[in-house]
Amino acid sequence: MKFCTGTGGFTAASLVAAQAIIAGAAAPSTSDYSAAQVADGTAFKNISDIASANMQYSADACTYESASVRAEWRTLDEATRKSFTDAVTCLSTMEPTHMKAEEASDYPGVKSRFDEFVATHINYTMNIHDTADFLAWHRTFIHFWEQDLKNLCGYTGNLPYWNWALDADAPQDSPLFSGDEYSVGSNGKYIDGRSDTWLATMDFSYPPGTGGGCVESGPFVNYTVNLGPLDLPNTDNVNSSFQYNPRCLVRDLNPWFTTRYNTYTNLTETILDNIYIEDFQNYMQGYGSSTNKLGVHGGAHWASGGSMQDFHSSPADPLFFLHHGMIDYTWVIWQNLDNYRRIDAINGTSTLGNDPPSAEMTLDDIVPFGFVADDQRFGDLMDTTAGLFCYRYE
Ligand SMILES: *[C@@H]1O[C@H](CO)[C@@H](O)[C@H](O)[C@H]1NC(C)=O
Ligand SMILES: *[C@@H]1O[C@H](CO)[C@@H](O)[C@H](O)[C@H]1NC(C)=O
Ligand SMILES: *[C@@H]1O[C@H](CO)[C@@H](O)[C@H](O)[C@H]1NC(C)=O
Ligand SMILES: *[C@@H]1O[C@H](CO)[C@@H](O)[C@H](O)[C@H]1NC(C)=O
Ligand SMILES: *[C@@H]1O[C@H](CO)[C@@H](O)[C@H](O)[C@H]1NC(C)=O
Ligand SMILES: *[C@@H]1O[C@H](CO)[C@@H](O)[C@H](O)[C@H]1NC(C)=O
Ligand SMILES: [Cu+2]
């Protein structure tokens, strides 16, 4: 069901519910739904609709009606999907736009505009994960990438996202990875005979996925990844952060991760069981828990395989931007279920796990975007219908 635009399309009940939340009533919790509703996506749809209804009370210049709408990949028509992946290929074959000639020797792996995004994420990895600005930095990073697809490569749609909860049972069977020309490229070619991988930092081992080799059909079959990996298991990692290391795009879709970390239950509990921003951002990234070691964020990264598993260079796979669209959508719902308290809620410092210790961030801090774009004031990155942004999800 599409959500109607304009208050005329709302039922009286949803208006009352929305106003109750604006007035400060508690956001819904998991106990408002049956386990079946949490597991099958019904509860997620309901809280997404409540958050959308709340967004309509925004008094910003960007209105609910004027906001651009980011939709799930499989709901896009074929022409839009193809124009999106064509624009990504355009970005990956375009000269860098921000790196100065005298900087090129410091960044030997930066060959394209797309690589400037990857290099910037590598550069700031330790300052944008498990920090106060994890969500805001990645929101802004994918926004600038979306703007480049439009402004530099003629894409006329909006950034699509990947709702992995729809594919949690078997991501390898998802239409996203069918490998036809309207997909985001296939899974990696299946590699037989691999053994389990022990992840010492996580204290668990996981079985090989359903691919493991190069993407074999679809839009990114000829794609060249230039940067990374820096920290992958079972791989020849680079010896310097920005080393030139050209190779194919590898994927290894793995239901072992998605069934544990990316189900509708996992997604919905992330939003509903975490009232405070420090708990919400920790739960989503899998920090501070011995049972939830990856969260929905880490789960889909590990479930994708290849570059997506590399902490530093994960944006090298265009899938990163569809995954982080879903992460941003999750935050947008969380924020708008109680927008008065949550839009500007932040907690934490600017160093991963506060190691080395750094100051608590404030909304007046300047957040760096390296070769991507101008640095931004943190407080300007909190509301998707104000400042730089004017978009919503459905
Ligand atoms: C969400 O679910 C509740 C309880 O079933 C219902 O009263 C409400 O109308 C729903 N809200 C929306 C926006 O669908
Ligand atoms: C990939 O490269 C091969 C060999 O150059 C070419 O035949 C094929 O059309 C390319 N496929 C795509 C999807 O660009
Ligand atoms: C890193 O250096 C070692 C030792 O010289 C080399 O064997 C390895 O291939 C290098 N890794 C990459 C990705 O270049
Ligand atoms: C994710 O949800 C599944 C059921 O859908 C459950 O078995 C699993 O324990 C959940 N994972 C976490 C980390 O809560
Ligand atoms: C951040 O959250 C922690 C844990 O709840 C809390 O102790 C701390 O006071 C919070 N910091 C700020 C600045 O609110
Ligand atoms: C990397 O970080 C340094 C220090 O903040 C900055 O001067 C440089 O421009 C950054 N490079 C990229 C590619 O982000
Ligand atoms: Cu990241």
Image (cartoon, grey):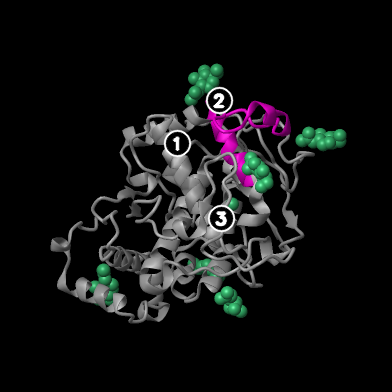
Give the farthest residue toward the left.
8
Name the residue type under label 1.
Answer: Asp
Give the Cα separation between the discs numbered 2 and 1: 13 Å
Name the residue type under label 2.
Answer: Glu
Counting residues from the start of the chain, the first of labels 2 and 1 encountered is 2
CA neighbours of label 3 inside 10 A, class few (<14), some (14 to 19), many (20+)? some
Q: Tell me residue 381's x, y (percent).
A: 46, 56
Name the residue type under label 3.
Answer: Ile
Q: Residue at x 55, y 54 (%)?
A: 300
Q: Quadrant of ligand 1?
A: bottom left
Q: Is residue 352 magenta?
A: no
Q: Residue at x 40, y 33 (%)?
A: 151
Q: Tell me residue 197's x, y (percent).
A: 73, 53
Q: Is residue 109 magenta?
A: yes
How many tags in the picture? Answer: 3
Q: Quadrant of the C terminus?
A: bottom left
Asked if residue 55 is positioned above or below residue 93 in the image, the reply reads: below
Counting residues from the start of the chain, the first of labels 3 and 2 encountered is 2
Residue highlighted by disc 1: 148
In the image, is 61 to the left or to the right of 220? Answer: left
Q: Which residues are magenta?
A: 92-121
Q: Tell me residue 306's x, y (percent).
A: 63, 43
Residue highlighted by disc 2: 95
